Amino acid sequence: MNINRKAWSTGLFLWALALAVGCQNSGAESTEESAETPTRSGLYQASELALTMRDMAKDMESLRQKADEGTLTVEEVDALMQTHQAMASDAPTKPEDIKPSFAGYSEAYLSQLEDLRAAIEQQVSREERLDAFNAAIATCVACHQDHCPGPIPRIQKIKVQP
C-alpha cells in the first residue's frame, strides 16, 4: 500500500509541475498569437452589411424604451440616420441574394427615420411618435421578408405597442 501511495504522490507532483510549466508557456504564446492574429480559412466572416444590420438592431432595441417613454431625442435619431445609412453601400454576404428592391427599402427606412425625427422635433402626440418609430421597424420587416427572413422575429419584438 505504501508503494501505491508513493506512486500516486509522484504522479500528482509531476502533473502539478507539468501544469505549472504549461501555464507559463501558454501565457507567453498567447501574447505572441494575439499580436499576429492569424486568420483561419473556413470560418464565417460577417459581411459589412451583416455587421451594420446587427448594429441597427442593437441601436433600435436600445432606443425602444425611450421611444415608448417619449424621451427619444432628435440627436439620437440623427445618430441613427448617420450610422444606418451605411447599409445602402455595405457589401452583402451574398451579393447575388440582394434584389433590386433593397435600395428602395434602404431609402424608405431612412425616410422613416426622418419622419421620426420630425415627429420628435414637432412634439407631436405619443401615438404619432410611436407610429413613426414603428413605421421604421415595419420597413425593416418588409425588407427582410424579401431578402433575409431569419431576423424578422427579433425585429418584430422592437415594435412598441401604442
Image: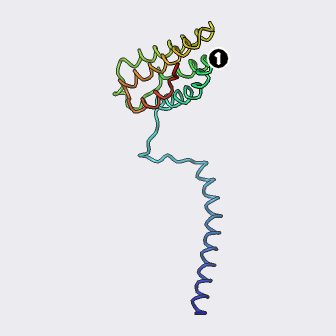
Residue found at x 61% / y 69%: 19
Left or right for 48, reference 28: left
Q: Quadrant of residue 83?
A: top right
Measuring from the top left, give residue 79's x and y in whole percent.
61, 20
Q: Which one is in front, 104 or 145?
A: 145
Q: Residue furthest top?
A: 122
Q: Residue furthest front?
A: 162
Left or right for 113, reference 152: right
Measuring from the top left, give residue 11's x and y in whole percent.
59, 81
Left or right for 147, reference 63: left
Residue found at x 64% / y 58%: 28
Q: Secondary structure at mark 1?
A: loop
Name the quarter where the N terminus is drawn.
Answer: bottom right
Give the amino acid at mark 1. Thr
Measuring from the top left, give residue 82's x and y in whole percent.
58, 19
**Number of numbered tags placed on the structure image:** 1
Q: Is residue 150 above or below residue 101?
A: below
Residue found at x 51% / y 27%: 158
> How is the model colour-coded?
rainbow
Q: Quadrant of residue 10?
A: bottom right
Q: Which one is in front, 85 or 140?
A: 140
Residue found at x 55% / y 30%: 58
Pointer 1 residue: 73
Q: Residues within 10 Å of mark 1 (few under 14, many from 20)?
A: some
